[in-house]
Amino acid sequence: MRPPIRAALSNALQCRCPNCREGPVFRGWPNRVWPRCPVCGLSYFRESGYYLAGMILTYAATAGVLIPTYLISLLLPDMKAVTENERFALWSLFAIFLTLIFVRPAYSLWLSLDFWIDPWHPGEQQR
């Protein structure tokens, strides 16, 4: 039986195993995923390229913040003290910062949603 979607999303934001809700998904920063849950043994890698959707979610979240922020910044008074190259560098650093902030929740969200849609069990063969 599936847990409520709200529980799956909450679990994803906490970066916990979607099966036991105790084991961590990540073993290092920024996105070093454990091969299996250290608590229940659930495989976190179902197939080659499994976290491509996590990368897409990271990109979408970053663009979802970056683009509106940039458009709002166009309404602000122009800063003459900052050159175009400096602005480009600041926006690039902001984009990298956002990517690093969103990568873990996005990977964990993908893992939890996939598990919620099509659960698998510890020890099950990978696809």
Image (spheres, rainbow, N blue to C red):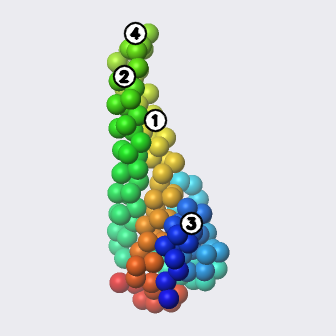
User: Which residue sits at x=57%, y=69%?
Assistant: 11
First in residue order: circle 4 vs circle 1: 4
Label 3 to label 1: alpha-carbon separation: 26 Å
According to the picture, the residue beneath numbered tag 1 turns out to be 94
Q: Position of residue 6 (x, y in %)?
A: 52, 69
* Left or right placement of residue 78 versus residue 105 in this view: left
Q: Do callouts 2 and 4 mark residues in contact (Cβ within 8 Å)?
A: no
First in residue order: circle 2 vs circle 3: 3
Q: Is residue 79 visible?
A: yes
User: Which residue sits at x=56%, y=66%?
Assistant: 10
User: Which residue sits at x=43%, y=67%?
Assistant: 110
According to the picture, the residue beneath numbered tag 3 turns out to be 10
According to the picture, the residue beneath numbered tag 2 turns out to be 75
In front of the other: 3 or 92 = 3
Disc 1 element: helix
Q: Tell me the kind of residue under disc 1.
A: Phe
Label 1 to label 2: alpha-carbon separation: 18 Å
First in residue order: circle 2 vs circle 4: 2
Classify mark 3: residues with Cα within 10 Å, few (<14), some (14-19) or many (20+).
Answer: few
